[in-house]
Image (tube, rainbow, N blue to C red):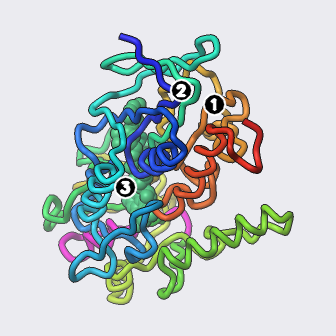
Amino acid sequence: MTHRTDVVVIGGGQAGLAAGYHLRRLGLDFVILDAQPTPGGAWQHTWDSLHLFSPVAFSSLPGRPMPVQSGETYPDAGHVVQYLTDYERRYELPIMRPVAVQAVHRDGAFLRVEGDTGTWRARTVISATGTWWRPFLPTVPGQGTFRGRQLHTVEYRSPRDFAGQRVIVVGGGNSGAQIAADLAHATELTWVTQRPPRFLADDIDGRALFDVATARRKALESGRADTGGVASLGDIVAVPPVREARDAGLLKASPMFSRLTADGVEWADGTRATADAVIWCTGFRPALSHLGPLQLRGRRGHIATDGTRAVDEPRLHLLGYGDWTGPASATLIGVGRPAREAAREIAGTSPSRRT
Ligand code: FAD
């Protein structure tokens, strides 16, 4: 069966909900298609101890502030799932679940969205599918020979699964540092990073990061020099568990090894370490395979955008994937602004862009 609507939003995580909030305010006819059976997007799948890197006041979507979580300055992932669940109910967002979109095609004046339960024809599509669903694993010699367990961030849950084991955590970003900190007390940990870890100052949390991203956006918008944004400050937010493990001397990083062996890893100088498990905290790529038929992919798998709009397909907007779809748009507090701009462009009310 084929449905007709003005706008299809693909993805019902925070980015899709922020888009829905603004589309609703502008009175557009739309539907949100989400592959998950339940609300919360990727937050439903993170490891048990994950907490946000900013307090609730700096973790809210447009319209509805995130409530404080009792006893926690930095809320946990379960609290975010509850918040997103309440958010979509409160605004009565038209979400269909589970619907996995397999392909988006050009179809005359429309875009045709093919899902596993039906087809939608829309004037405009907002893709808001996140990155969690496309874990990135580097190619390292010997990967096939290692007899232990290899997993990515997306599969990690708890130190209980590795108690007493020799674990190698690969990755110098936030996931790597947080998972290494999580494992530091319960396992024989080796933390491996490509370059020496760069911790942000202890007083910098998500709020300060948002301010820095905002300052960068303003500088770029007014034609001033690029301030360098968040990346200029460091890679790792020193959230309390990371700070504690670091200060206890448990987060000493080793350089990247050159290959895996049958029972561990080996560095270029011949040094070896045995391991029961290697956890690859090596990042994500945007989950854009459903847009394949539009043939828009460019550098690093991104799609060229002007704001959120795809340069080569003006009926398509991309939301929430990273700075290339709006400064800080891959955060709870940051996605509201590009969502609003996308909705305004779609409604033809944007003061700054052509529709
Ligand atoms: P997602 O939450 O991934 O939602 C996308 C939705 O689209 C999912 O429900 C998915 O099932 C669905 N989908 C995907 N493909 C399809 C398809 N083909 N068809 C239909 N549906 C589809 N941000 C903060 O603001 N503060 C933090 O403290 C913070 N910590 C983070 C910690 C980690 C470990 C990670 C990975 C990210 C963190 N982020 C944080 C960043 C960001 O807020 C999250 O990644 C967030 O989940 C991104 O939301 P999203 O809506 O873009 O994507």
x and y, in percent, of residue 85 in the image: 27, 53
Residue density around tag 3, few if under 14, some if 14–19, many if 20 or more, within 10 Å: many
Q: Does the magenta stretch include residue 324?
A: no
Which residue is tagged 2?
Answer: 291
Instruction: Please tell me in which quadrant of the rendered image residue 278 appears.
Output: bottom left
Which residue is tagged 1?
Answer: 297
Q: Upstream in the sequence, badge 2 or badge 3?
A: 3
x and y, in percent, of residue 93 in the image: 36, 43
Rendered-image quadrant of the C terminus: top right
Closer to viewer: mark 2 or mark 3 = 2
Marks 2,1: beta carbons within 8 A: yes
Which residue type carries mark 1? Arg
Marks 2,3: beta carbons within 8 A: no
- Secondary structure of residue under mark 3: strand
x and y, in percent, of residue 100 in the image: 35, 28
Task: Give me the residue at 27% from left, 31% from top.
Answer: 98
Residue density around tag 2, few if under 14, some if 14–19, many if 20 or more, within 10 Å: some
Closer to viewer: mark 1 or mark 3 = 1
- Quick one: 328 or 68, which is closer to the camera? 68
Q: Is residue 182 magenta?
A: yes
Q: Upstream in the sequence, badge 2 or badge 1?
A: 2
Residue 192 visible in rendering: no
Residue density around tag 1, few if under 14, some if 14–19, many if 20 or more, within 10 Å: some
Which residue is tagged 3?
Answer: 265
Task: Give me the residue at 78% from left, 68% from top.
Answer: 219
Which residue type carries mark 2? Leu
Compared across the picture, whether 11 is left or right of 23 comes to left
The magenta span reads: 177-195
- Secondary structure of residue under mark 1: loop
Compared across the picture, whether 47 is left or right of 287 comes to left
